[in-house]
Image (cartoon, coloured by chain):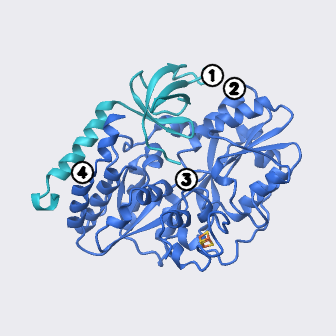
Chain colours: A blue, B cyan
Amino acid sequence: MKYLDEYRDSSLAKSLVAELQKAVTKPLRIMEVCGSHTMAIFRNGIRSILPEGLELISGPGCPVCVTSAPHMDAFIAIADKPGIRVTIFGDLFRVPGSHGSLANASSRGAKIDIVYSSMDALEIAKNHPEDLVVFLGVGFETTTPGIAATILAAKTQNIKNFMVFSTQKVMPPPLIALLNDPELKINGLLCPGHVSSIIGAGAYQPLADKYHLACVVAGFETADLLKGLIFLARQIGRGEAKVENTYERVVSWGGNPRAMKMVDEIFEPSDMEWRGLGVIPGSGLKIREKYADFDAEVRLNITLPEAHEAKGCMCGNILKGINTPRECPLFNSRCTPTNPIGPCMVSSEGTCAAFHKYGLDM
Amino acid sequence: MCLAIPMRVTKVEGNPDDFTTNQIATVDADGISREIRLDVVDHWPAIGDYVIVHAGFAIHSLVEEEALKNLALLRELAENMPAELLS
Ligand code: SF4
């Protein structure tokens, strides 16, 4: 697409870097919330061109990384049951639970299909009437509307062997939980691009009001990211705390009401456990009783097992922005992408995986 | 997960207000044509519009104009800088 190239235009990027340099007038700690931002920042080499005094830390925005150990164990236990076929987004396949991963379950005979979309999981259910097909819902506001639409489609088409195990999570509550943590000292938030396209830039207003935090929504191209950082640095420099949207081509103030309505039809808020952050009230979504036939937790009577986190894995603190992967004693020694100990090394959006991939491992 | 590349709509099926119809668009991304769902897109796209796709679902549709406006703002930001910083 022709105009996309211009967002990647290197002379434009150069000018934006210079502008950023000018905007940073005091030490800044900015958290990029979204795992896709973390990856885009590494991929575009933005960390290496940051002005001195600007520190970027990664937040809890990688959905696989924040999936709790009990949930991971429950996923594996479901996959091991006869007559069940589990469908997942690919990132989940190799995440370790207390004892092995879904990949291990698959090699001992569990039926696990990696899908690109939840609708593909529904197709699999149609093609395998002999199995109960469970879609493991792991994600944020960007995936929830599609999963809701899939459940609605299953109901409309009267497909009885399809259900969802929802660990879907919502974005503002964990940020509030983090901001209440005195260990975390940040001046600003680089707010997620696509989560915000659903919930709207306005969703961050309480963070600006209550915690006096500068919030800027940004896109994923080099120019988008730099623009977001410039706006943050300028805002903080002026001592302001407001919500600004620099990704107007995709994000509006009010979000996507069509998607939010679809989510509200199928899901209701629930308390949810996050890896590293514990249980956060109202931070999850469970399937409404009206759609209980599509709720794996109800139909399969799932109770979350006792689980233990891998010993020595610091994912929890990394998700909170308190430590970086380099501070983890296992990083790049016992824990590597081929032999991951924690989810932050497995997911393509995980901070440890990003540090490994882009050679920030010394 | 968040591939941000907008895809161009070449065909639209279904009725935006009726979820019993198959709400599907055919999109073109770098010459590859594929089907995506329109169940949760914010604005029903017309042929020639662009959509942002997430896990098989369009979540936002935009017209080229919006995208160009955004780019103009970026340029403005770059142009407001003193010349010595541009080299
Ligand atoms: S490097 Fe491995 S063990 Fe250490 S925090 Fe990251 S995922 Fe956990």
Residue at position x 33%, y 35% in the image = A2
Res A302 visible: no
Q: Chain of mark 1?
A: B
Q: Chain of mark 3?
A: A
Give the CA distance from mark 4 to mark 3.
34 Å
Residue at position x 63%, y 22% in the image = B20
| Badge 3: residue crowd in 10 Å (few <14, some 14–19, many ≥20) | many
Q: Which residue is mark 3?
A: A170
Q: Chain of mark 4?
A: A
Q: Which residue is mark 4?
A: A12
Residue A156 is marked as: 2
Residue B20 is marked as: 1
Co-location on one chain, circles 2 and 3: yes
The first of marks 4 and 3 along the sequence is 4
| Badge 1: residue crowd in 10 Å (few <14, some 14–19, many ≥20) | few
Give the CA distance from mark 2 to mark 1.
7 Å
